[in-house]
Image: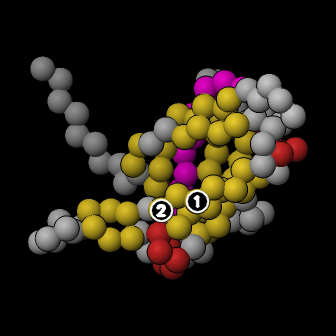
Amino acid sequence: MERKLDLTLSSEYDLEFDKCRTLDRTLYCWYYTGSTGCGEEEFDFTFYSGATMYIKNSSGTIVMQFSTTDGSIELGLGGQLTFKKTDEEMCRIRAGCYVYDLYLSSSTYPKRAFLRGKVIINESYTT
């Protein structure tokens, strides 16, 4: 029996976006603390100065990038993580299934893994 010990810091979630549509969506990030009671807390992004997400095709080529540097990712209070792209930018990627990874950065953690998974880009049939 094969055993796997996952030591990654990132969580795996699949994302779905529409092609050629303005993207302005906020995720609310929470984590379990293991404390008594509910044990859920908002993820605190105030310790991080930046975030970068790469979307890659099956050969590993970056087909789209999101970053706090260009404003396409915003780290907000209350565990808010917002993705932004114009409809024109979203038209530059082909419809299909890709993979992504998102990392946070700070002076302490230059690359802290945060999210990873699949990205599905849906074709838009109307303009």
Q: Is residue 34 visible?
A: yes
Mark 2–mark 1 distance (CA, rounded to whole Å): 7 Å
Choose between 90 and 53: the one closer to the eye.
Answer: 90
Q: Check residue 99 for magenta coloring.
A: yes
Choose between 124 and 115: the one closer to the eye.
Answer: 124
Q: Mark 2: few, some, or many residues within 10 Å (few <14, many ≥20)?
A: few
- For mark 1, give the secondary structure: strand
**In the image, which residues are magenta?**
95-106
| In-image side of 118 versus 86 (left or right) | left
Q: Which mark is residue 26?
A: 1
| Circle 2/circle 1 CB separation < 8 Å | yes
Q: Is residue 111 visible?
A: no
Residue 126's x, y, as percent?
Answer: 83, 29
Residue 38's x, y, as percent?
Answer: 19, 68
Q: Residue most toward the front? A: 126
Q: Residue, x 12% and y 72% (percent of image)? A: 36
- For mark 2, give the secondary structure: strand
